[in-house]
Amino acid sequence: MDEFGLIQVYFAGAPAAQQGCGLDHRQALGIGDDAAVLAPIPQGQQLVVTTDSLVENRHYLADVDPTALGHKALAVSLSDLAAMGAKPWAFTLNLHLRGIRKPWLEAFSKGLNALALEHGMSLVGGDTVSVQAEEAVVVTAMGLVPLGQALLRDGLQPGDELWVSGSLGDGVYALKHKPRAKKLLWPQPRLALGQALREQQLAHAAIDISDGLASELGHLLERSQARARGTGLTAHVHLQSLSQCLGPELQAAVNRNELDLQQACLLAARSGDEYELLFAAPLAARPAIEALALQLDLRLTPIGRVDLTNACPTGQPASNDMAQSRWYGLDGHPLSLSQDALAGFNHFQPPAGQET
């Protein structure tokens, strides 16, 4: 089997390549030509585009269940769409493989197509290439959002509460202790949550937690500070609140006295591979958010707040250190933490045992 046979057998003929929102037009064309011709973007909608790469031995192990990998390859990009409040539309797939392994491809395409069909997405193209070293899977996902209504990172406002969805910490814990944990292999993108936050205008800002809560909070602060131009923002995060949304694997480790509660909370604060949403909302939105949690059957936990810091002198731009986060221990007292203590996933850090 060559490249064209691989594409035809495992992807071009799959349900996701024959249907879905991106091909929902009689003049649309998916896999099979030099490029895809997609359905017209509905009036009043904007296209949201995101790309994610999963690289062997950095983002997944070589012996991972290929069905789970197919699911995760699309799920991580869907999580980005969720953070923007977008509705999934279409995607492309690039595979960098050492060789054509039919059972692996069959299982991988099964996981990929199942998630695509669940969300009405069209597989509209991509590429395959042979590699000698690590394999990789690259997905580019497209979604739709009403014009001007996308949830962004730069909307933090003084008085906002900080919320997280689901549970945190099992990503980093599973990497070390249980690499086949469901949370790590089968992430569930919070698309319904993101769309509801946008539709009900509940959130001022949102981001998906892929590289760690503390790291993603830093991104929210940085972007919002740049937009504020002179008004400093400080995020206050309480480990006592964070302890209410620890992942089941991490909570079990605490129950077995393998970790104390504060250690577990700090792990949850820097854990990547979570694909939950961190969002900021005004205090007045709390009842609606609590009602939304019940409606979606999804835990939504307030973990802190955003306040003003000292404003810059008139005419001077805000400095980066005016956007900061402060963390409080289980006793409510401020914690003195090194930068590394809450460092998230570093995509350019070599795997253990390798030199740069």
Image: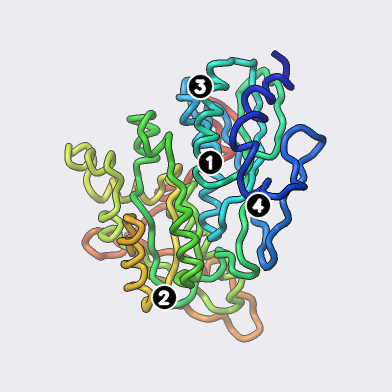
Label 3 crowding class (10 Å Cα cut-off): few <14, some 14-19, many 20+?
few
Residue on which the image places disc 4 = 49
The three-letter code of the residue at mark 3 reads Ala
The residue beneath circle 3 is 62
In the image, 334: left or right of 5?
left
Between marks 3 and 2, how big is the CA–CA gap? 44 Å
Q: How far separated are the C-alphas under marks 4 and 2?
A: 28 Å
In the image, which is nearer the foreground, mark 4 or mark 1? 1
The residue at the point 25 percent across, 59 percent down is: 240
Quadrant location of the C terminus in the rendered image: top right
- Amino acid under label 1? Leu
Write down the residue under mark 2: 282
Numbered circle sitting on residue 117: 1
Other residues around mark 1 within 10 Å, as few (<14) / some (14–19) / many (≥20): some
Q: Which mark is residue 201?
A: none
Confirm or deny contact between disc 3 and disc 4 (CB under 8 A): no
Task: Tell me residue 36's x, y (percent).
Answer: 76, 41
- Amino acid type, callout 2: Pro
Q: Earlier in the sequence, mark 2 or mark 1?
A: 1
Q: Quarter of the image holding residue 10?
A: top right
Q: Position of residue 250 (x, y in %)?
A: 28, 41
| Comparing labels 2 and 1, the label whose residue is closer to the camera | 1
